[in-house]
Image (cartoon, rainbow, N blue to C red):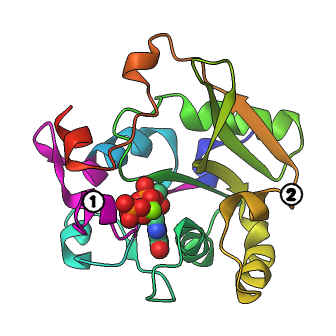
């Protein structure tokens, strides 16, 4: 069993938001509150502590009352840079990431990832959903990992690589299937465009 207190939660809000016109996606309102604040409110009860990874408007994220860490590199190399920023600051044995733009992710996300990681003695666990055509769709930014993977990630990124699936593929990974009762209202819905936000 993994104690939730041994897990640090990280909200990934460090992207360019280019499909949303280059805005800071985590600060865009959804049902009256910033997207990243929705993520924070959902994640906080599931873990021991939470931090935010952001690269712009750091003061706005700090006003949520949790630590905020930017990427070490300021050239937006992708979500793995956020993983690294989190692992560098993580003081617990586990780190779990969620993106800032999925305000309805499951309330038992972390518990189920932790259960699978423990049961399979894996290094990582990630969420997977089933598409309408039966295919399994991984969601690698919903990822629980051992904090000891930091050295591996440093080496991977130092080699100029940035693809999440390439890195996770180097480790023993537990895939956790979340069945959506209503695929039209998926818990893993994410807002990439202004239209997504209004939907
Ligand atoms: N730290 C960090 N996080 C990133 C970076 N790029 C994307 N992310 C995060 O990874 C998650 C998934 O990325 P996307 O949904 O593609 O978001 P995005 O990159 O801001 O948006 P687009 O520019 O439209 O692709 C989001 O939570 C982003 O904040 C980056 O360069 N650094
Ligand atoms: Mg992107």
Q: Report the front residue among 162 and 63.
A: 162
Task: Identify whether 124 is placed above or below 180.
Answer: below
Rendering coords of residue 49 (x, y %): 47, 56
Residue behind label 1 places its C-beta within 8 angstroms of ligand 1: yes
Asked which secondary structure carries label 1, the reply is helix
Measure the alpha-carbon separation of dots 2 and 1.
30 Å
In the rendered structure, which segment of residues is drawn in magenta? Answer: 8-37
Identify the residue shown where x is 64% and y is 52%: 6
* Residue located at (20% from left, 77% from top): 59
Mark 2 residue element: loop
Determine whether, in the image, residue 30 is placed left or right of residue 143.
left
Pointers 2 and 1 in contact (C-beta within 8 Å)? no
Q: Position of residue 169 (x, y in %)?
A: 82, 56
Please give the residue where the numbered disc 1 appears in the rendered image.
25
Comparing labels 2 and 1, the label whose residue is closer to the camera: 1
Residue 199 in the image: x percent, y percent? 21, 31
Residue 14 has which mark? none
Residue 49 on the magenta span: no
For label 2, the residue is 171
Residue 45: name its quadrant. top left
> Residue 44's quadrant in the figure?
top left
Say left or right for 163 vs 63.
Answer: right
- How many numbered marks are there? 2
- Work out whether residue 126 or residue 193 is closer to the camera in this orientation and state it: 193
Q: Is residue 85 visible?
A: yes
Q: For mark 2, does the 10 Å Cα neighbourhood hold few (<14), some (14 to 19), or many (20 or more) residues?
A: some
Q: Quadrant of ligand 2?
A: bottom left
């Amino acid at each position: 069993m993994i104690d939730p207190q041994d897990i640090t939660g990280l909200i990934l809000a460090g992207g360019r938001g280019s499909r949303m016109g280059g805005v800071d996606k985590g600060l865009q309102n959804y049902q009256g509150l910033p997207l990243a604040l929705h993520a924070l409110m959902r994640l906080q009860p599931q873990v021991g502590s939470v931090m935010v990874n952001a690269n712009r408007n750091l003061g706005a994220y700090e006003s949520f009352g949790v630590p905020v860490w930017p990427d070490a590199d300021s050239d937006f190399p992708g979500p793995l840079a956020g993983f690294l920023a989190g692992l560098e600051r993580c003081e617990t044995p586990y780190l779990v990431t969620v993106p800032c733009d999925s305000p309805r992710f499951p309330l038992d996300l972390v518990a189920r990832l932790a259960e699978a990681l423990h049961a399979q003695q894996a290094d990582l666990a990630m969420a997977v959903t089933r598409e309408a055509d039966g295919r399994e769709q991984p969601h690698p930014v919903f990822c629980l990992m051992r904090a000891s993977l930091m050295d591996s990630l440093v080496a991977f990124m130092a080699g100029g690589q940035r693809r999440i699936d390439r890195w996770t593929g180097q480790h023993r990974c537990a895939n956790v299937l979340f069945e959506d009762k209503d695929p039209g209202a998926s818990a893993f819905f994410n807002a990439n465009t202004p239209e997504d936000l209004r939907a």
